């Protein structure tokens, strides 16, 4: 049985740890509110961008643009897992990496090659630890991504797609549902999914009561060529913001659970310390009584 002093040291150590986890929970909570506001502000813009793309694509008809090109023989698939730069966020990073690796196995089962691009130190370190070749990685902005970060990633993956270094680009990230729920999402980024454009165009027609008649200046093909790179940037920026909000929500929940577990452990150790102290007192009383009996005897 541990001594009273040992138990006191453990209680003191766990109390200090709980102060740290409580502080981290409060910081994550404050950052979550800002990240959630940015994410919710971005969603309508991204949805409207998709509607605009669908409308212009419908007006343009069958056009041949590099970012819309669908290749019959897909040989290389680019996988872009979006993770955090730091840990202490529960299963936030692990579930994205696990899903990305499962996607790699699916791709290889189809006789294709997986090409890795990554964001966040956790993804980069895990992939390198597994001796997987990472073409390019981006770090340092997982908690507060800027639009220029999305532009840099979009330029790299778009260039790889246009140059036929890859035939498909897929992003894997945590979509923000609530502070307690983050949903792992797998989305095809390139080529731009045709079914998504058609579905969005049909929804727009139903909402407007028919096919809207617009006059385009310049021609729809030229507008579409300009919109496509912006669409890729927008989708990546949306994924980065969703991931940032999810990270703070996961960290806040993880730190709250850690603080709760620390409190329960402190209560358990305090009870054990009181029992140990009571046992010491009882032992001292027995020794005094035994000494008194020896003297009187």
Image (spheres, helix red, strand yellow):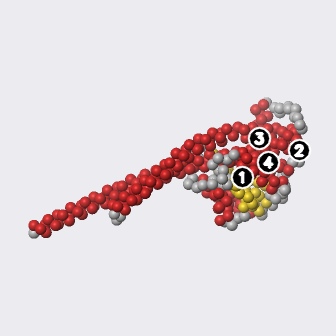
Name the residue carrying label 3: 50
Q: Can residue 69 be spotted in the picture?
A: yes
Instruction: Choose top left, top right, bottom left or bottom right for residue 76.
Output: bottom right
How far is disc 2 from disc 4 in space, using C-alphas? 14 Å
Q: Identify the residue at the far top of this view.
A: 209
How far is disc 2 from disc 1 in space, using C-alphas? 26 Å
Left/right of residue 75 with respect to residue 102 in the rendered view: right
Closer to the N terminus: mark 2 or mark 1?
A: 2
Tell me whether circle 2 and circle 1 mark residues in contact (CB < 8 Å). no
Q: Residue visible at 37% across and 60% down?
A: 7
Name the residue carrying label 4: 192
| Residue 165 position in % (x across, y down) | 82, 59
Closer to the N terminus: mark 2 or mark 4?
A: 2
Q: Secondary structure at mark 4?
A: loop
Name the residue carrying label 2: 62
Please tell me how crowded label 4 is: few (under 14), some (14-19), or many (20+) other residues with Cα within 10 Å: some
Closer to the N terminus: mark 3 or mark 2?
A: 3
How far is disc 1 from disc 3 in space, using C-alphas? 17 Å
Circle on res. 171: 1
Please tell me how crowded label 3 is: few (under 14), some (14-19), or many (20+) other residues with Cα within 10 Å: many
Closer to the N terminus: mark 1 or mark 3?
A: 3
Tell me whether circle 1 and circle 4 mark residues in contact (CB < 8 Å). no
Tell me whether circle 3 and circle 4 mark residues in contact (CB < 8 Å). no
Q: Secondary structure at mark 3?
A: helix
Tell me whether circle 2 and circle 4 mark residues in contact (CB < 8 Å). no
């Amino acid at each position: 049985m541990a001594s009273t002093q040992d138990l006191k040291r453990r209680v003191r150590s766990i109390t200090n740890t709980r102060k740290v986890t409580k502080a981290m929970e409060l910081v994550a909570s404050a950052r979550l509110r800002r990240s959630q506001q940015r994410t919710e502000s971005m969603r309508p813009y991204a949805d409207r961008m998709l509607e605009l793309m669908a409308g212009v694509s419908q007006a343009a008809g069958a056009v041949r643009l590099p970012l819309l090109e669908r290749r019959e023989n897909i040989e290389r698939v680019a996988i872009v897992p979006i993770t955090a730069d730091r840990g202490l966020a529960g299963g936030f990073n692990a579930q994205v990496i696990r899903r990305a690796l499962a996607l790699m196995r699916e791709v290889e089962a189809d006789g294709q090659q997986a090409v890795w691009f990554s964001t966040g130190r956790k993804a980069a370190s895990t992939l390198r630890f597994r001796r997987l070749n990472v073409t390019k990685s981006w770090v340092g902005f997982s908690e507060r991504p800027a639009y220029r970060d999305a532009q840099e990633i979009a330029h790299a993956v778009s260039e790889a797609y246009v140059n036929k270094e890859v035939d498909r680009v897929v992003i894997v990230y945590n979509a923000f549902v609530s502070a307690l729920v983050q949903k792992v999402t797998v989305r095809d980024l390139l080529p731009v999914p045709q079914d998504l454009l058609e579905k969005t165009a049909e929804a727009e027609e139903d909402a407007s009561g028919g096919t809207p008649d617009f006059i385009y200046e310049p021609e729809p093909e030229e507008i579409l060529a300009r919109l496509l790179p912006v669409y890729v940037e927008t989708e990546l920026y949306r994924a980065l913001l969703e991931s940032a909000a999810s990270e703070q929500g996961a960290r806040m929940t993880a730190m709250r659970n850690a603080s709760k577990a620390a409190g329960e452990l402190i209560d358990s150790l305090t009870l054990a310390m009181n029992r140990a102290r009571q046992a010491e007192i009882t032992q001292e009383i027995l020794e005094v009584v035994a000494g008194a009996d020896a003297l009187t005897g």
